[in-house]
Amino acid sequence: MIDETLEYSICQYLDGELAPHEVAALQKRLAEDPEAAALLEEYRKLNGAMDQAFAMPAVRWDALAAGLSATIEEEEQAQRMRISTWLTTGVRLAMAAAVILAVALFASLYKSGDTAGPADPLVATSHVLVEGPLAEAPRGPAVADVEILPPTLAEAPGRSAEAYAMEGLISLPSRIVVIASESDSGQDILR
């Protein structure tokens, strides 16, 4: 019967992986047991045959490392060139698109022979038609007249609307009614 523990110990012994106290115990057993010694010789022959069959070729590691480094550097350089070419092409395409958009915008604003355009070409005009509910018709006279002053007559610091009213520049109503709701007159405010 084959002792698996002995086989494992012999394999570790041949690989140099046994601890020193285990090496001494195995050598003692090999000296006392001829079957164990025969098994050791059989494993030595098997290791020798494996080493010859799968011998590692002579490798110049420094040349291999230099070749690999050069290949990696060439690939990185090629990658940088592809990115650079792509970016350059992208910038050129963006510039061409901007020029095309500018020409199209110019052409749409200034059609040839069109003299009905705006007087100031920098001022764009547009018209929007908003349809919605109609405003309620007034049910009585206006409560207050509101005048919008030009910016030159706006209140100066320290001057009130009453001061302008005394000068005759604006007219103030005698009373103001704010109507919050048509149906509930309790919300109306009289000032």
Image (cartoon, rainbow, N blue to C red):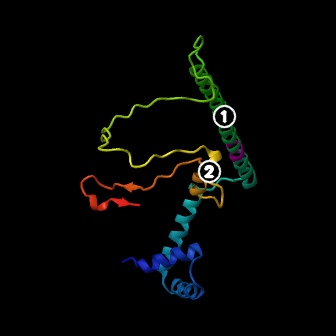
Point 65% across, 46% down: residue: 152
Q: Is residue 29 left or right of residue 64?
A: left
Q: Which quarter of the image is occupied by the N terminus?
A: bottom left
**In front here: 159 or 38?**
159
Identified by mark 2, the residue type is Glu
Q: Which residue is labeled 1 in the image?
A: 91
Residue 25: x and y in percent read 54, 88
Location of residue 186 with respect to 104 vertically, above or below: below
How many residues crowd around disc 1 within 10 Å: few (fewer than 14), some, or many (20 or more)?
A: few
Residue 76: x and y in percent read 68, 45
Q: Which quarter of the image is occupied by the C terminus?
A: bottom left
Disc 2, SS? loop
Q: Does the magenta segment cover residue 73? A: yes
Location of residue 137 (image quadrant): top left
Q: Is residue 79 left or right of residue 40?
A: right
Q: Nearer the viewer, mark 1 or mark 2?
A: 2
Q: Does the magenta segment cover residue 151? A: no
Location of residue 47 (image quadrant): bottom right
Q: Is residue 121 left or right of residue 11?
A: right
Q: Which residues are magenta?
A: 71-75
Q: CA distance from mark 1 to mark 2?
A: 65 Å
Q: Which residue is labeled 2 in the image?
A: 167
The numbered dot on residue 140 is none
